[in-house]
Image: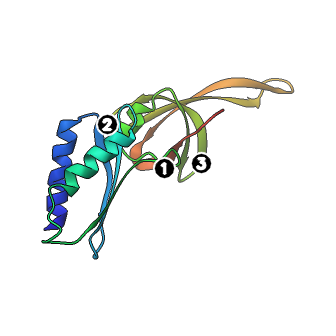
């Protein structure tokens, strides 16, 4: 089956370059293969070419006709895997949960979730005006509906 062949070829490609990992694999009914990869140190064009060649050169078009697209996870794509969060430690994220949207710095990652830190302006406990307070929250992955790296210039 095409799905199994592609999955095995991807495993081989990731063994050859273990800084790369799979984000998404989709094969349509008309054999359009779409692969989205990411890497611990980013993904170069050559990384995409190497993964593409690994798949293309090991499938027989005489057996099954197919089209192939290998791309990297874009900056606007949400983070999905713990490994993606890890590579973005120290960066500012926009994280959406069922209850709120938080813009904060990613300060820790583990198998259960992430830790975020940010500063917020809140009313003073006594008197008028506001003061800046440090906030921190730990979010399990199950509560995160969307998380994106914020690009700042």
Q: Dot 3 surroundings within 10 Å: few (below 14), some, or many (20 or more)? A: few
* Disc 1 + disc 3, Cβ < 8 Å: no
At horizontal 17% and vertical 72% (from top left) the residue drawn is 64
Q: Is residue 127 above or below residue 153?
A: above
- Residue for badge 1: 77
**Left or right placement of residue 111 versus residue 99 in this view:** left
Q: Is residue 76 above or below residue 82?
A: below
**Depth-wise, is mark 1 or mark 3 nearer the camera?**
1
Mark sitting earlier along the chain (1/2): 1
**Left or right placement of residue 55 versus residue 46 in this view:** left
Q: Residue furthest right?
A: 128
- Please state the horizontal and vertical placement of residue 68, each as a whole percent of the image: 30, 61
- Please state the horizontal and vertical placement of residue 4, each as a whole percent of the image: 15, 61
> Which of the 4 quarters of the picture holds residue 114?
top left
- Residue for badge 3: 100
Q: Dot 1 surroundings within 10 Å: few (below 14), some, or many (20 or more)? A: few
- Residue for badge 2: 111
């Amino acid at each position: 089956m095409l799905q199994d062949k592609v999955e095995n070829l991807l495993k081989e490609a990731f063994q050859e370059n273990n800084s790369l990992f799979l984000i998404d694999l989709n094969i349509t009914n008309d054999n359009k293969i779409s692969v989205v990869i990411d890497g611990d140190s980013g993904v170069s064009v050559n990384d995409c070419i190497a993964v593409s060649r690994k798949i293309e050169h090991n499938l027989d078009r005489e057996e099954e006709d197919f089209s192939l697209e290998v791309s990297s996870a874009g900056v606007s794509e949400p983070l999905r895997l713990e490994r993606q969060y890890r590579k973005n430690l120290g960066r500012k994220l926009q994280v959406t949960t069922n209850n709120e949207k938080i813009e904060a710095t990613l300060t820790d990652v583990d198998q259960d979730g992430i830790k975020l830190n940010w500063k917020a302006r809140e009313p003073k406990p006594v008197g008028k005006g506001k003061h800046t307070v440090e906030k921190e929250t730990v979010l399990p992955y199950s509560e995160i509906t969307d998380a994106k790296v914020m690009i700042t210039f």
